[in-house]
Amino acid sequence: MQNKSVHELLEIIDSSSVGSFICDMEKGEIYYSYEWSKRLGIEHLSPREATLVATTYVHPEDQDDIQRAFSQACEQKSPKVRMEFRVKTVDSGYIWVLGQGKIIYDQDGRPVKYYGTHSDITERKKTEEKLQRYTEELKKKEEESLQLIDSFTEGTWIVDRLEGTIKCSEKWEKRIGLDLVPEEERLAYTITLPNSDDTVGGNSIQHQMKIGAERFDLEYRMKTVDRGYIWTQNRGKIVYNEHGEAIKVYAATLDITERKQMEEELRESERIALDLVEKLRIADKNKNAFINMLSHELRNPLASIMMSLCLMERISSGEKREARALEIAKRQGIQLTNLVDDLLDITRITQNKIILKKDTVEINNLIDMAVQDYRSQFIDKNVKLEVQLTTPLYIEADPSRITQVVGNLLHNAAKFTNSNDLVTVTVSHEIKSNQVLITVHDTGRGIAPEFLGNIFEPFIQVDKSLDRSLGGLGLGLAIVKGIVELHNGKVQVFSEGIGKGAKFTIWLPL
């Protein structure tokens, strides 16, 4: 197919390229190196047949470019030709090749022979395509970033200290009036814009450059054309030369006037709130002092009234009307005395003025005695009262105060139960926490869910009726909580709702 000398020459050239060829344009023949002709799938064709099909293996989009490049070289009598195109191979489909060759002309300037090589540049082309896509994406992202920065900032600017110039975004340039200032005066003009009151103590870009800071984040007021002084946040980077001299400043400016106004309003609100808290503290202190004084002032005449009633009872003539009047007066006097005592106790608790007189107490005996003191109240209402005690349990407590706690819970149960209801007082030992549990459980009126969360707060009244038939100031449960907590214990309430009773549980450390 090829004479021996041409074959050897092509194989030598082929060792440094993907493929090589010799085109004899006078004979209309083309000789390919064997490996390259095999890769093109034309190893079985004669040189003349190969000429006829050579261009059909070139990618259709590249055929005109090849013809144009070769024709141009011939017109210019250029000996060298260089072109890049895609060619179809048997093993890899289309690949990119770099075609380089030399054209031999006769004495009349006609091309007679063309010696060439094909080098596979597919990987290089892929890399170039990736680089091109990356470059295009980078440009797109840069444009998007610039638009994004411009939408989030009031302005961006660059200072070139070597040239003594400043460049600003168009919006910021107009806002600070820089567009009206001559180029040579712009940098000096911008230095005068920040409010001097805000740039003391290192709060200036000039100071940041002086101390060698690479980045800065400064807040100060700046003069604008449209609104006068506005609060701005200025963030940026300072670039230094090898001598440590600042040569460039890149920065962005944000208008934070609204934020600053909100901060000032918040500070003012906090000041007002603190003043209000202080006034409330004083009012609460005065209230407690008034309640304390009122309670003491009421106790003295109450004591005299109660003593007088007792004396009148002894010297009574025995008439029924007189006896009934004395009974009513005495009952109301006792009720009033209890209210005054509650006021005194709650005031002492809130002011941490209760002094406990602790002793070692056997809790079962204490609870049993407290129950006996209140049993008559339940008998009068036909309410069944049961007590369930346990083995002896000892606590360190003020016995009179613990009796008061149980009494308040029993009094509360008596108020909210009716005939045939049941009240159960239980004492038990919670082994896991080593505490004594005291529960007062009734089947009475129950507690609405909305009251459960704050039922132990002072002056909370479950009975909201106008007639206030059950009486009281709403201090009994608050006193229970305060005294229990003074004994390092806790108290909780549980009720499934109105008509389903209530259960109060006290935990006290053994």
Image (spheres, grey):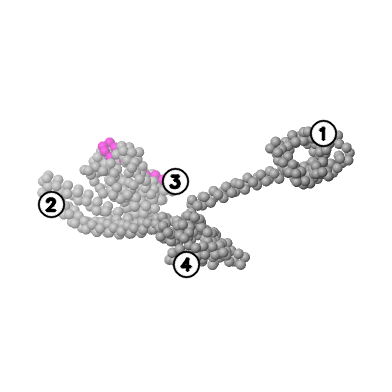
Whole-angstrom CA distance, mark 4 to mark 3, is 65 Å
Hey, what amino acid is under mark 3?
Answer: Ile
The magenta segment? 417-431
Residue at the image point whose x is 17% and y is 47% from the top? 328
Question: What residue is pinned by disc 4?
Answer: 201
Per the image, the residue denoted by label 1 is 48
Query: Label 3, on which residue?
Result: 431
Q: Is residue 424 above or below residue 233?
A: above
Residue at x 44%, y 61% (from the top left corner): 222
Look at the numbered disc 2 and give the secondary structure of its residue: loop
Marked residue nearer the N-terminal end (1 or 3): 1
Q: Earlier in the sequence, mark 4 or mark 3?
A: 4
Read off the residue under disc 2. 315
Marks 4 and 1 in Cβ contact (< 8 Å): no
Q: How many marks?
A: 4
- Of labels 2 and 1, earlier in sequence is 1
Query: Which residue is nearer to you in this view: 472 or 154?
Result: 154
Residue 45 picture location, percent across and down: 82, 32
Nearest to viewer (mark 4 / mark 1): 1
Mark 4 / mark 1, whichever is N-terminal: 1
Residue 5 locus on image (x, y percent):
88, 40
Determine whether label 2 and label 4 are within 8 Å by CB.
Answer: no
| Residue visible at 15% across and 48% down in the picture | 326
